[in-house]
Image (cartoon, helix red, strand yellow):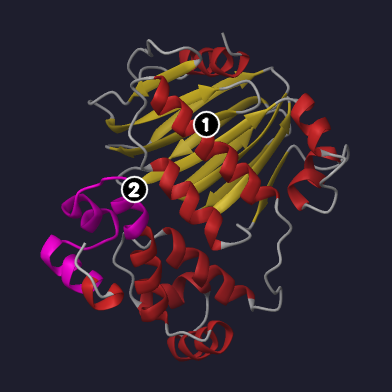
Amino acid sequence: MSKFIDSHKAVLKQVGNLYLDTYSNLPNHQLNLCNPSDGQGYSELYDFDRLCVGKGQYWLNHPQQMSANTQVYSLGLTILLSGTHRIKNHQTNQEYEFQSPVIILRKGILGLQTLYLQEHTKMSLISLDFDESLLKRLEPSITDNDLIQFFLDGDSPTIKTTHIPHKDILHHAQYILNLPLAKNMLDLLHLEGAALELLSLLLQKNTEKECIAAPIQKAISILETQFDQKITIRHLSKQVGINECDLKRLFKKNTGQTIGHFLLKTRMKYAQSLLKNGVSTEHVANQIGYSSAQYFKRIFEQHFGYIP
């Protein structure tokens, strides 16, 4: 059995009955379903030796407080795609608040921690965990990547956040999140390939220009991860901390596109990936923030020139 899955099961024993009993007939695979009395959602883990990939999304009926003591040395990262997580580390007495979209890097023995989860908020994430043997194999060929440097630096903090380097990572993380829960070995093989591709994207050197203003970078990240929600310029400007006029002007200056066109292209690209994998147009429309499948079809046809 996987040490990552064993560790995860040990944590779940400490956090009460938020999840129902774990189960899976597949090797090195674990599925947890949220207790209906607490909300809805799931978490899924698959360990294929080189890497343990996890994904989960949930909606809670009331705030949850989960405390667990993790004494296993671990290396990993979490891509928080939606929602806000707040964590307190009782050993260091430090508190962290993570607002999506963001990458959370983790290493070492985390010890006793309490996770505070919001109510009535969609939360979703992808996690990748690995051991030092994978890190040693990657080290000789990847020395200029910020993620690798974090895990190699003995003086760096146990937990650190970093911006998501480029939109392909967001698209691929969302793709993994929307894969059906694994029912057979072919599903696990598909999940393994998708996880390795995500790791490859994360380890690529970021070639995008770093001169984009921080508020615009944040706006781009929000549009690329929350495109399934209703996004207004007024709300977006409040989130990034600049007024609406400056936001529209700077966004067009930095990206060459209006906010509306950027959002449309993001939705259409993600819609294409879902359709390619056999997802119905009704479900695709819901996944990208459209209430009507007919409206989605019309917009898709206008954008690509053919009917989905």
In the picture of the structure, the residue carrying the numbered disc 1 is: 192
Specify which label sits upstream in the sequence, 2 or 1.
2
Q: Residue at x 64, y 78 (%)?
A: 213
Q: CA distance from mark 2 to mark 1?
A: 29 Å
In the picture of the structure, the residue carrying the numbered disc 2 is: 121
Q: Quadrant of residue 53?
A: top right
Main SS, magenta residues: helix
Outermost residue to the front: 306
Q: Quadrant of residue 273?
A: bottom left
Q: Residue at x 46, y 20 (%)?
A: 15
Magenta includes 297? Answer: yes
Q: Is residue 96 left or right of residue 178?
A: right
Amino acid type, mark 1: Glu
Q: Residue at x 66, y 26 (%)?
A: 50
- Residues drawn in magenta: 271-300
Asked whether residue 120 is in view, the answer is yes
Expressed as whole percent of the image width and height from the top left, the position of residue 170 reads 50, 55
Helix, strand or loop at label 2? It is loop
